[in-house]
Amino acid sequence: MSTENMADQALAHSPLFTNDATVFGIICILLGLVFYTANSNTPFWQKFYMFVPSVLLCYFLPSLLNTFGLIDGENSQLYFVASRYLLPACLVLLTISVDIKAIAKLGSKAVILFFTGTIGIVIGGPVALLLVSVFVPDLIGVEGPNAVWRGMTTVAGSWIGGSANQAAMKEIYGAGDQMFSAMVTVDIIVANLWMAVLLIMAANAKKIDAKTGADTSAIDALKTKVQDFEAKHSRNPSLTDIMLIVAVGMGVTGFAHLFADNITPYFVENFPGLAKFSFHSSFFWMIIFASTVGVILSFTRVRNLEGAGASKIGSAFLYILIATIGMKMDVTMIADAPVYFVIGVIWMLIHASLMLIVAKLIKAPLFYMAVGSQANVGGAASAPIVAAAFHPSLAPVAVMLAVLGYTVGTYMAWLCGQVLQAIN
């Protein structure tokens, strides 16, 4: 091939936008458009988002830029920056609002069902992989970044905590971009199918609770309590509030990096056998530090920043992270993922079955089961949707449980990853 032809070929594969600042601006515009249209009163958009989850577009639209060669997601530094700076800050800001005492007062049944859902996901993934591997043996025994078990750890992170925990698992367990693209597709589609089932059940909650003999008297008390709490704590944020929120998020992120930079070499040098537990990953220690400090701060006055919108700023960081993940995806991978969908469906069936069985055994109201499940699987983005289907004032209850999911998501998804790794 002549030098001229090689140059022409290189030019043909050169992305249209190569400056990360330009790419960052484009994905922020896309995110803005998604949120604007998702909250539009236009009948077309209302019907559109009934079938297409907004979070899917936040992944999908940036992935189109990469798929069609408009940007080079593989060589962009945006994901690195988002995962190292915005992700830890996001985890802190989402976690400081957790109210352990308030969650405990919701009643033991709500917490029992939440953790039942968590356990269902931790054990469901490995069981699903083992079942499907009976028919597709190649799923097990694969090494490298595109091993199925590595991709499944990211689904576990998403279904226990949320996208932030999903991104954390991607880095901790080294899931390859191709496998991650396929698993994101499985995650979103299967999770939204289950949410649709929960919404249908919510519409028939009275009949279902009557058949199971559940005591729903506490639900009415919850409605009143939540409404009073919201009225007391919410406020319009001042510039000082916003700067304090940024200070907490980014300040903890800075010390998380400092902690990881010092603790990681210690484990590498003194405990070489702990590499398989991710103890040699600086990213692992950074995420653990940020999540743990967030929980500690939730017991201090710092949690009052939630009234000024700490979780909203954390969520903004999260959606930027989601878009940068999407930049690295290739949508053509969807065609290669049928077997992964089978794994995902079996996984969700195990989670759902365990939830329904325990809910029946303890005679819990359907509300607790539905919100406990969605707080795991959907996180703060969609759990309030399910809660609001029972009553609009109950949405914050779902947020509290979802924040609990963010808190335990990293730890429990890591545990699921260890089990998946062991059976591979």
Image: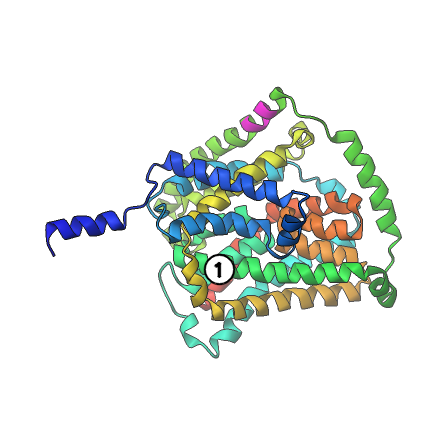
Q: Report the front residue among 279 and 282.
A: 282
Q: Is residue 196 visible?
A: yes
Q: Classify 145 as above or below 318.
A: below
Please indicate whether residue 295 sits to the left or right of residue 321 in the image.
right
Q: Position of residue 362 (x, y in %)?
A: 80, 62
Residue 299 magenta: no
Its colouring scheme is: rainbow
Question: Measuring 51% from the left and 30% from the top, which residue is drawn there?
Answer: 250
Quarter of the N terminus within the rendering: bottom left
Q: Position of residue 320 (x, y in %)?
A: 50, 40
Q: How many marks?
A: 1
- Residue receiving disc 1: 183
Q: Residues within 10 Å of mark 1 (few under 14, many from 20)?
A: many
Q: Is residue 404 visible?
A: no
Q: Report the front residue among 180 and 218.
A: 180
Q: Position of residue 252 (x, y in %)?
A: 52, 32
Provide the secondary structure element on which disc 1 rests. helix
Location of residue 156 (image quadrant): bottom right
Question: Measuring 65% from the left and 42% from the top, which residue is drawn there?
Answer: 40
Q: Which residues are magenta?
A: 242-246
Name the dominant secondary structure of the magenta segment. Answer: helix
Q: Classify 254 as above or below 185.
A: above
Quarter of the C terminus within the rendering: bottom left
Q: Classify 301 as above or below 193.
A: above
Question: Measuring 61% from the left and 20% from the top, which residue is drawn there?
Answer: 240
Please indicate whether residue 322 sits to the left or right of residue 307 in the image.
left
Q: Position of residue 342 (x, y in %)?
A: 53, 71
Question: Measuring 38% from the left and 61% from the top, which residue is drawn there?
Answer: 146
For the residue marked with disc 1, what is the amino acid?
Answer: Met
- Residue at the bottom extreme? 135
